[in-house]
Image: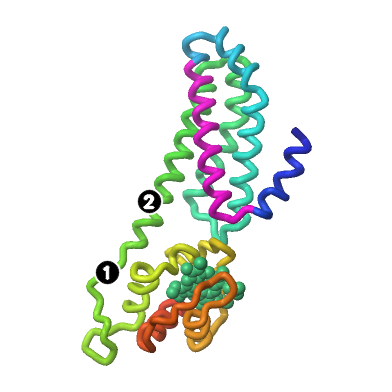
């Protein structure tokens, strides 16, 4: 067990953010399932709860460590933590001692409350995800012809970045997803012409976008520049 905990940082350092996120999600679901089963057993048949707890002692420990470690890792990689995430963290950390005591001492209300809090934290995480996708809604009726009335390079760039090209898959809708080794665009210090250079020619893991015309490159650069803090 201790060896396993020691190996985790090494494991995480070779995994990408996206795969750790997926692992976190899977682990959270297993964690939740274990606790729902335990709660069911506690309420219906506490003899069976003892059998289950004994049989699942090691897997439960593994899942808990993985759950907290992957969650902790994701937090350190996030440039900013939202209020929703803080509430989620408080719920998770408050629920742990409650669950430990509740299940050990067979205090049904305490155990039920702890599971409820974990479920609530899970719900918050889902809400957070929805809130983020909602922000992605981008107008598709955008004037794309520079020099004509109502043209905005910013809006054109947003459309290209968010919808027409695949920038979001590495940089995320806010520019700060940092997937596949992508830097946080909010913290970028590049000028417009430097951004144009990176997008046109690509760099490292980032593919080149050779088919974009000058106006499109300029619009992207204006949009990405405005993401900068
Ligand atoms: C496959 C993932 C991927 C995609 C898709 C992608 N990027 Fe990148 N981007 C990266 C990576 C990785 C880097 C860092 C490259 C390096 O320095 O090695 C990067 C770097 C950048 C930089 C430089 C930031 C800085 O401060 O150095 C800009 C600007 C940028 N990307 C904009 C875009 C735009 C705009 C798009 C869409 C047209 C896009 N990227 C699509 C992965 C991606």
Q: Can you give x and y, in whole percent of width and height, for residue 57 in the image?
A: 65, 23
What are the residue bounds of the magenta stretch? 15-40
Q: Determine whether the residue tagged by mark 1 lies in a helix, strand or loop.
A: loop
Q: How many marks?
A: 2
The residue at 50%/55% (across/down) is 82
Check residue 139 in the rendering and tell me which mark sits there, or answer none: 1
- 25 is within the stretch colored magenta: yes
Disc 2, SS: helix
Q: Residue at x 61, y 45 (%)?
A: 70
Alpha carbons under labels 2 and 1: distance apart = 18 Å
Q: Which mark is residue 86?
A: none
Looking at the image, the residue that sits furthest to the bottom is 147
Q: Percent position (x, y) of residue 146?
A: 29, 89
Q: Which color mode does the image show?
A: rainbow
* Vertical side of 151 occupied by 137: above or below: above
Please give the label number shown on residue 130. 2
Side (left or right) of 191 relative to 220:
right
Q: Is residue 221 placed above or below 76 in the rendered structure?
A: below
């Amino acid at each position: 067990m201790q060896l396993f905990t020691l190996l985790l940082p090494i494991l995480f350092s070779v995994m990408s953010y996206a795969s750790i996120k997926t692992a976190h999600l899977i682990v959270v679901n297993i964690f939740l399932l274990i606790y729902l089963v335990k709660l069911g057993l506690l309420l219906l048949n506490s003899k069976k709860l003892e059998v289950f707890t004994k049989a699942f002692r090691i897997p439960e420990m593994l899942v808990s460590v993985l759950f907290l470690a992957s969650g902790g890792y994701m937090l350190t990689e996030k440039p900013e933590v939202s209020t929703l995430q803080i509430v989620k963290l408080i719920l998770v950390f408050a629920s742990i001692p409650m669950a430990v005591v509740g299940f050990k001492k067979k205090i049904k209300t305490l155990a039920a409350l702890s599971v409820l809090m974990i479920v609530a934290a899970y719900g918050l995480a889902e809400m957070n995800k929805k809130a983020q996708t909602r922000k992605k809604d981008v107008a598709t009726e955008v004037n794309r012809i520079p020099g004509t009335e109502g043209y905005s390079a910013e809006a054109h760039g947003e459309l290209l970045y968010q919808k027409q090209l695949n920038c979001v898959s590495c940089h995320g809708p806010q520019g700060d997803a940092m997937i596949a080794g992508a830097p946080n665009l909010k913290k970028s210090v590049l000028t417009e012409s430097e951004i144009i250079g990176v997008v046109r020619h690509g760099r490292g893991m980032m593919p080149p976008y050779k088919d974009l015309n000058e106006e499109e490159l300029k619009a992207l650069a204006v949009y990405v520049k405005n993401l900068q803090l």
